[in-house]
Structures are given as structure tokens and as C-alpha cells.
Image: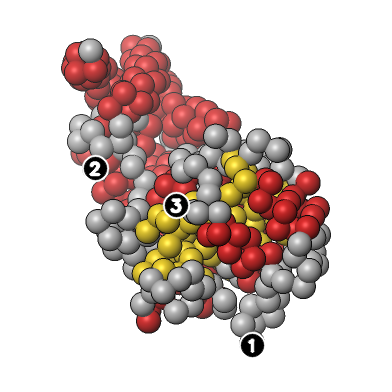
Amino acid sequence: MAFAALIAAYQEAEEGEAGLRALLPMAGRSLLEHQVRRAVAAGASHAVILVERVPAALSAALDRLRRDGIAVKLARDPIDAADRFHPEEHVLLIADGLVAAPDCFEAMAVRTAPALLVLADTPENEDFERVDANHRWAGLALTTVDTVAATAAMLGDWDLQSTLMRRVVQAGADFLPVDGEAGVVVDASDAVLLAERSDKSRDAGRTMLRRNSVQSDSWPDRFLYAPVVTRIAPMLLDRGIEAIWLRIAALVLAFAGAAAFWWGWLWTGLALVLIAGPVDAIAGRIDLAQLRNHEGGWEIRFLKGLLQGLAILAIGWLAMTTTGEIVYLALAATAVLLLVLARRGVQHLRKLTGSDNRYLPWLADGNAAIWLILPFAVTGYWFHWPIAVAIYAYITLFLQQNMLKEAVRQRG
């Protein structure tokens, strides 16, 4: 069943905090944006934000979501909100200020309305609204458009979020526990929380950043960039640094490195192309924390691969002009071609076997090819680097064929 999200965004933050809970900072963005992206990632077709006032920060958050192609609408009252859903849609109600793990959203998305995400009624869960003697509401409820409309019609001065949750319970909701053996997660600590002030939302963003790991198919990402990324990315997130500017910086560094190789400034080029890698990785971690594609759009991926290929060709050109042997340029062009084929093969293999394939990090890609230059730079055999890249990419293609055959055999 298709569903859409109804997000409450009208409650004020706790005393001492200016503004709405929905606009509390989280992972360099607003808490509202995090909620919308979580819902969309779980399958929501669109989101309706129930607000009473629209400050400039809320308008900016909605503009950022729309720029990423996410359908989001404002509703100024409950009746207006009910009118913005298709009659056959299920509605996922998201509590004001809720931070929930992706497993919670995904578990609710496959349920049939009415359903309620619940926690045990224990002292540590006292921030959550009590449902009955044994349960508290964990901030997610799945209901129907008819229930939303009926609740809005009889609401009066009552709070929509709380009243709608009660109507879902009265309709005989299926209780889905967050914790326990039959729950969404075994340990509910940090799985759900209500952020009423900025320290809670910031802590939730940092926790998410630590737990979110990029399942990369490149050994430099995992073993070289990770220590830098885990230290720098949280600081940049807190300062609101946009990932796109880091992407652009990485591309500029890669272009400058390729140009330096072209002009024979080998050590300068080496430093620039190596620095470009972790800068791009930091941007990827910021995107991941903000629930966007950690590899960037196809344009970014294309330019990144193009510049890495140009660095290899620049060394081949320099080798040809220095020695007079055209074979160096031909080998560099062959290396780039094989690297492109290897990269496509890795992507196909990843789709078939998943990101947990233990061999994926060691296969050739652009980052791995760049770092392969180090032993040749240290020993002074710069011109042999494209040859090593070609061999590395060829071995990758050979291994890919065997792994693809094994994956197809296991599926068949």
C-alpha cells in the first residue's frame, strides 16, 4: 500500500531555545529535513508538514528538499492537511521532534493501517506519550486518510498529533515494539528519541554520523580516508558546511593535480591528487549524514572519473615527450580504458553481491589507481605508473568475471 508522511512541526522547543522543534539543528540541517528524508527513504511518496507559522528557516529547509526532488507541501491546519492526501494512501504520522532509526521507518512502512510504534512504559521512556499501562508511543503511527479527516473534523482545540494517535489506538492498532526479541531493534537505546532542545538533536546527529558507514568498494576510502573523515566531518557538519563545496574543491584539486603532471611538476601533482581523495570522502560522509547520495550525482561521479583518467594520461604524455616513446601514451590510454571497464564491473558486481563482499575493497577504481602511484614516486619510476594501473585493472576484470559467474551460479 502506498503511503505518505504527515509531520507535525508546530511545537516550540523547550524554554531557553528559540524557534520550533522541527528547526532544531541536526547533522548540519534541520530536524524536519531529517524526518522527511527518512520517510522518503522508507517509501513515502510525499510529505505534508503541519505548521502554524512559517519562519524563514522553515521555508529554506523546504526549498532544499524540493531542490533534491522531494515532494513536500505545507498545511496550515488539520483539515488542510487531510485534503493533501490521496484517498487510498496510508498516512505515516511522525511526531514533532522525533528522531528514529531507519529500521523504525522501514518496519512501519510495510505494515497495514492502523499500526503504532511503541516502547515499554519504563522511567527512561518518560519523554514519550503514554498509550496504556504497558506502552508509550514511540512517535510513528500508520493510519488512513479517512481517520485523519475524521480527526481533523472533530478536533476543536485538541492537539492533532496526540488526538490522531489516540484515534489510531481506538481503531485497534497493531502495536509494533521498538525493542525486545520481537521488536524492530534488539536494543532501543538511541533508536528513538524526542528532541526538545538543540543539544539532543545535535547529539543525535553525531550518533548517526558515527553509525553511518560508507560501504565503499575502494580500499583507500576504508583504510586511508576513514580516520580523517571521522574526525573532520562532524566539525564541518556543526558549522553547516555544504557538501557540494567540498565536492567542487576536490574536483579543482584533481584538475590542478592533472595539470601539474602535464607540466612536469610531479610532486606538486601527486600532493594535489592525493588530497582530493579525502576531501571528496568528507563530502560523501556529510551527504550520508544528511541522507543524500554519498557518491554525489552522476555529474560529480563523471567529472571525478574524468579527472582521475586525465592524471594518468598526463603522466603518459609526459613520459612520451621526455623519452620520445609513444608507447607510454598508448599504455596510459589503455590503463584508463581498462579502469573504466573495471569500475563498471565493480558496480555490477556490487548490485549482485551487495556491499558486504569482502573482495570489493581491493578491486581497482579511480581512488585505488591514484594511490598506486606512491611506490613509483618514491623510487623515481613515475612513468611506469600507468603500466601498473593497466595491470591492476586487468586483474580486476579477470577476478570480476569469476565472481560474477559465482554470483549467478548461486542465484540460479
Where disc 3 sits, the SS reads strand
Question: Against 322, is 252 above or below?
Answer: below
Please say if the residues under marks 3 and 1 sit with CB atoms less than 8 Å apart.
no
Q: Quadrant of residue 135?
A: bottom left
| 327 on left or right of 405 | right
Residue drawn at x 47%, y 64% is 138
Q: How is the image coloured?
A: secondary structure
Residue 400 % position (x, y): 25, 19
Q: How many marks?
A: 3
Residue 372 % position (x, y): 27, 35
- Label 2 neighbour load within 10 Å: few <14, some 14-19, many 20+: few
Task: Give the Cα separation between the discs numbered 2 and 3.
Answer: 65 Å
Q: Which residue is mark 3?
A: 174
Looking at the image, is mark 2 or mark 1 earlier in the sequence? 1
Where disc 1 sits, the SS reads loop
In front of the other: 232 or 392 = 232
Residue drawn at x 24%, y 17% is 411
Q: Which residue is mark 1?
A: 16
Task: Give the Cα separation between the discs numbered 2 and 1.
Answer: 57 Å
The three-letter amino acid code for the residue at tag 2 is Val
Task: Say whether residue 285 is visible.
Answer: no
Where disc 2 sits, the SS reads helix
Looking at the image, is mark 2 or mark 3 earlier in the sequence? 3
| 66 on left or right of 108 | right
In front of the other: 279 or 43 = 43
Q: For the N terminus, which image quadrant?
A: top right
Task: Give the Cα separation between the discs numbered 3 and 1.
Answer: 38 Å
In front of the other: 79 or 278 = 79
Please say if the residues under marks 2 and 3 sit with CB atoms less than 8 Å apart.
no
Question: Against 365, is 164 above or below?
Answer: below
Q: Which residue is mark 2?
A: 378
